[in-house]
Image: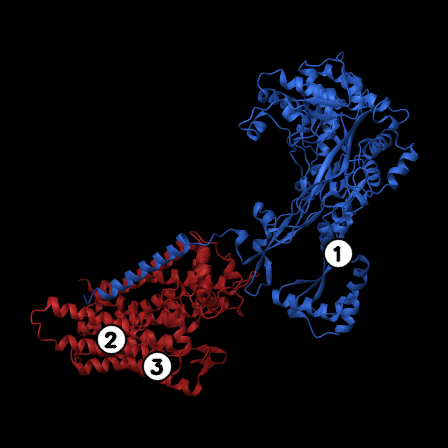
Chain colours: A blue, B red
Amino acid sequence: MRKYLLLLLVVLTGMSFVGRLFYLQILDSDDNNLDNDNAIRKVFQYPKRGYIYDRNNTLLVANQPTYDIMVVPQEVEPLDTLLFCNLLKIDKPAFLKSLNRAKVYSPRLPSLFLSHVSKKDYAFLSEKLRNFKGFFIRKRSVRDYQTDIGANVLGYIAEVNPDNLSKDDYYKFGDLIGKLGVEKSYEKQLRGIKGVKYIQKDIYNRDIGPYKEGQFDTLPVPGKDIQITIDAELQAYGEQLMQNKMGGIVAIDPTTGELLSLVSAPSYNPGLLVGRDRSKNYTSLYQDSIHRPLFDKSLIRMHEPGSPFKTLVALTALQEDVISTKDVIYCNEKYVYGKRNRVMKCHCGGGYRNLYSAIATSCNSYFAMAFRNTIDQYDDASNGMDIWSNHIQSFGLGNFLGNDLSVGKKGSIPDGAYYDSWYPDFRWGATTVLSNAIGQGEILVTPIQLANMTAAIANRGYYYTPHIIKSIDGESIDDKFKLKKQTTINPMHFDPVIEGMHQVYTKGTANFLRVPGIEICGKTGTAENFTKINGVKTPLTDHSIFVAFAPKDNPKIAISVLVENGYYGARWAGRIASLMIEKYLKGEVTLKAMEQLVLNKSLEEEYLKPYSGKPFKINQ
Amino acid sequence: MNLNRAQSFQLDWLLVLVYFALVIFGYFNIVSASSGIEFTSYFDLSKPYGKQLIFIGISVIVIIFILAIDAKFYERFASLIYLFVLLALLGLFVLGKKVNGALSWYDIGGVTLQPSEFAKCATALALAKYISDLQTNIKSIGDQLRSSAIILVPALLIVLQNDAGSTLVFLALIFVLYREGIPQNYIFIGFFGIILAIATLKFSWPWVSGAIGGVLLMYQLFFKRKKKKFGLPLLVLIITVGLSFGVEWSYDHILQKHHQDRIGLWLRLETDPAKVQAMKRSISYNLTQSEKAIRSGGFTGKGFNEGTRTKGHFVPEQHTDYIFSTVAEEWGFLGSSVVILLFLFLICRIIFLAEQHRSQFCRAYGYGVAAILFVHFLVNIGMVMGLVPTVGIPLPFFSYGGSGLLGFTVLIFIFLKLDANRLNVW
């Protein structure tokens, strides 16, 4: 025992030490890679963000430096506060507040003291600021908009939120990320890759030199410039026409699927979301719950399509061989159906109607017949509805288009199962859902879906997925945008429908919207809509809707216009569509009187009606 | 036996090798811990690693001297060396220099010297000499007291100089007394006392007293034949309760605040997570940083001079008392285990060699050396890893410090010299 006690204790101690080391270094070891070693500071170098050009190579978005005043509280020496505040154009409470906030954050580390000093002030301040120890200027890069249009298309960049941080570990707290528009959908191409420098720091958080002579450091990779399909001039014109109105315009080049303009009204100057007043401006845009300027109406404003949808009802009926161009019906300004003799009104003026005149005058009776025949030729209404729905959906309705825009809505095209669940113990039939025949009822679309539908008609049976990217730094774009998407309708059925749409302009509902020298095919639409006032469903003035493409042969532009509460289709939406088509195809507008009429029209009164608290009249 | 061969120099090269391995490895860790990231030259004498290189040089010279002197010298002059060291310790009260609150240093023209580092060696020699004296009978109470006095006098002087850590080392010499024949019971009682004290601090005295009372009651009722006699158990109970209460009272009323903190930290007395978190910024700061550095080393470590926490000086006192955290960060589990095994080998080898001696002096001295090294090893590495309460004593051969290195060198090489001469003793 005497010989072994010390020996035993020594060996036991050694073993427990090795055990403790094993626990600390292997079992309970800190995950020790470079990125979470808090003895290493990572300094990021931000690359230049890519520029954005329009389809004609007009620069829309560039970068500009912005200057922040930074402070290291520990290094601040007693200073002439009055002089300093005058230099920065702030008052003493603001000075003390900023300084105190920096102190609370860390006395040793630099904090933001005053953000977004103008370029002009910077030149002046950089000279003067040397006399104030502890303050310095940090340069950052923000967006510089070369245009005041297209805020909804271009989007904006802003600091990452916790959600961004948790989804992508590329981003660090305080980084900028595209939040909307192409800034969001082409974020990866635009941002580039930031460079990183690993700096060894000491216990006081001071830099003591590069980690391992900088062998792990990387250089920033600049972001790529992108060219978008928007025609800045057409976009600007569209925004101008939509002034004092709410709604959207979507123009597509049907031969490629390129989006020529995406107008959402009212819009705002994209420059508002840059600089010192950014958050103030954002808040006021966000809080405008009547006009909702941040809500892209061309992409996510779902509405009932109304009469333009009749073109698809006609195409489906032709494809299903339940109508022909020779069929004629007699319309006595109403369509009576069902056991209880329910009535669907018609405003076509009455008389004999074939396919062409039905489209030209937007005859409800004719399309109710076409829709019924389509569904009723199947024994089971649910089955018939499925087949009908499938044709309609092949035009890109009722689902996401798969485009490269940052927001979107599916819309709604009901099928058999949809009504089976609506009427579980009720045998429903075509007449039950007859309002679908005239683009109302359960049909919901967005302006971009309507424009795409029009492009598919213009192309006589196919479309390219609408997209906004033209090229990325000279490289070509995603192949999926070059793929023809066929509809389920045989191309030969399009000619009569297109002829009908042409007659809309020549002798139909849009005959006063003709543009000299351009053969336009179009379709008016007027959609009822409702709101709830104190829980009561209240009708509002109809939406004015219009779709068109031109020229009739070899179409170059397909367009859809939605003017909320603009009353009948030709009234505002039709006029705007005609003006846009002329502007795009001719480069200038000859219909000056029509242009003036549109520009001077304000629908502000309409939009305030539901908020007035008084009874109001609609469709005036 | 071939006397000629026996008289020739039989140095235990294995120990010498381990000694140099530890010193050289220790030196490189000091380089890493005391240089910044801009490290340029190994010979920068303004930096601790430059100075340590000089101390290593001096150590080599001292080794040659020690080995050159006749082995009999150490036994013969042990008392004289002891008295000289006692004088040096006393002299500190007049001429000493205070560093970090401890009056432990002589400052001779810029070179500081810490006599307590040499006192360990001198006391081990004196104790071995006294025990091995033919007149001494370690079984007698008188000689036991006198031996204890040899240990306690320098220990007392050092504790008066406010260097509690070094004092603890002298208690290691109890292992020498035990090896040479003091009764087993002393050790048992000692162990029991220590466990009682720790249990009291952890669970408070009423609990400990209750537990011991319960055990004694069970013994009295179920295991004892003469159940009526309960005098001895009662005495044991009274003594333990008294001790337990005494320990707690001393903790509350005699110990200084920082001692209480260290013990509290070691026994994990604070359980409120918020307060534990707050302690990481105050009293447990050193330990927290040290453990972080050790954890970050992982299996293979970050490599020499690459420890990010070492380079950023995150661990306070890292080149002295906390040097082992550098080893663990830069050399990982592998490297630090090797260091522990080398120490294990060194101490066990010394014990083994000491046992081979027929001379009681050599054996007692060898045990003294082993015990002193063991306590340093136990307390320092245990402290760095949070297994032992914080006590500021250096890790032999690793911690920066000239006196320390020289002290350990002298300690070991006197033993090696005695050992080399083993076969000449008859």
Q: Residue at x 45, y 64 (%)?
A: B288
Q: Is residue A382 above or below residue B80?
A: above
Q: Is the residue at mark 1 from the same chain as the one at mark 3?
A: no
Residue A420 image offset from top left, x and y in percent = 56, 27
Residue A234 image offset from top left, x and y in percent = 83, 36
Q: Quadrant of residue A456?
A: top right
**Residue type indicated by callout 2:** Ala
Give B339 or A238, whichever is nearer the viewer.
A238
Q: Is the residue at mark 2 from the same chain as the one at mark 1?
A: no
Identify the element where label 1 is drawn.
Answer: loop
Q: Is the residue at mark 2 from the same chain as the one at mark 3?
A: yes
Report, in whole angstroms, how far the alpha carbon at label 2 lies from the one at label 1. Answer: 85 Å
Identify the element where label 3 is drawn.
Answer: helix
Q: Which residue corresponds to mark 1?
A: A277
User: Of marks 2 and 3, which one's residue comes earlier in the chain?
Assistant: 3
Q: Quadrant of residue A318?
A: top right
**Image mark for residue A337:** none
Left or right: residue A289 versus residue B267 is right
Left or right: residue B85 versus residue A270 is left
Q: Is residue B130 above or below residue A409?
A: below
Mark 2 neighbour class, 10 Å CA radius: few under 14, some 14 to 19, many 20 or more: many
Q: Which residue corresponds to mark 3?
A: B85
**Residue type indicated by callout 1:** Asp
Left or right: residue A397 versus residue B135 is right
Q: Name the residue furthest top.
A: A326
Chain at numbered mark 3: B
Report, in whole angstroms, how far the alpha carbon at label 1 lies from the one at label 3. Answer: 78 Å
